[in-house]
């Protein structure tokens, strides 16, 4: 019986050690999407928490870009069904536009 307890205790110590040695995975906010279609970003304004990844999907039949007004991010020309993603890490308001069609604008508000 003592050998059983010793073996059980040894297993418990090993398991506890293994869990302690595994680093915690970073918590990432859920991904959010903005669609580009008919010369429009939809939704036009989005409020997210810091750390959120926003994926911009071009659903239009012509190329578009996604450019931060202050140069925070810049996509290549996205053809139909291509995407661009950006992690909004810091709180603030981020205005953006399409470099090929500057009348297309949007805004991301990032909260802590």
Image (cartoon, rainbow, N blue to C red):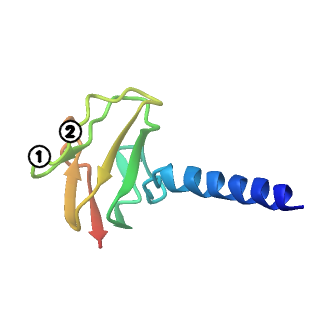
Residue at coordinates 22% horizontally, 62% vertically from top-left?
Answer: 90
Residue 86 shows up from this direction: yes
The residue sitting at the right extreme is: 1
Residue 37 shows up from this direction: no
Q: How crowded is mark 2: few (under 14 residues within 10 Å), some or many (20 or more)?
A: some
Cα–Cα gap, marks 1 and 2: 7 Å
Side of 46 where 6 appears, left or right: right
Between 57 and 87, the residue placed more toward the observer is 87
Q: Where is residue 80 in the image (x, y as percent from the top left)?
A: 44, 28
Query: Which element is circle 1 on?
Result: loop
Vertical relation: 52 (above or below) 101: below
The residue sitting at the bottom extreme is: 112
Q: Residues within 10 Å of mark 1 (few under 14, many from 20)?
A: few
Between 31 and 34, the residue placed more toward the observer is 31
The residue at which mark 2 appears reads as: 74
Side of 99 where 18 appears, left or right: right
Q: Position of residue 69 (x, y in %)?
A: 13, 51
């Amino acid at each position: 019986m003592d050998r059983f307890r010793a073996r059980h205790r040894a297993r418990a110590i090993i398991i506890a050690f293994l869990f302690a040695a595994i680093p915690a995975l970073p918590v990432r906010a859920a991904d959010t999407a903005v669609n580009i279609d008919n010369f429009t970003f939809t939704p036009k304004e989005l409020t997210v928490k810091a750390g959120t990844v926003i994926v911009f999907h071009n659903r239009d039949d012509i190329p578009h870009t996604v450019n931060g007004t202050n140069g925070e991010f810049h996509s290549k020309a996205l053809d139909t069904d291509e995407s661009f993603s950006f992690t909004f890490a810091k709180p603030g308001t981020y205005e953006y536009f399409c470099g090929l069609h500057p009348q297309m604008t949007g805004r991301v508000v990032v909260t802590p």
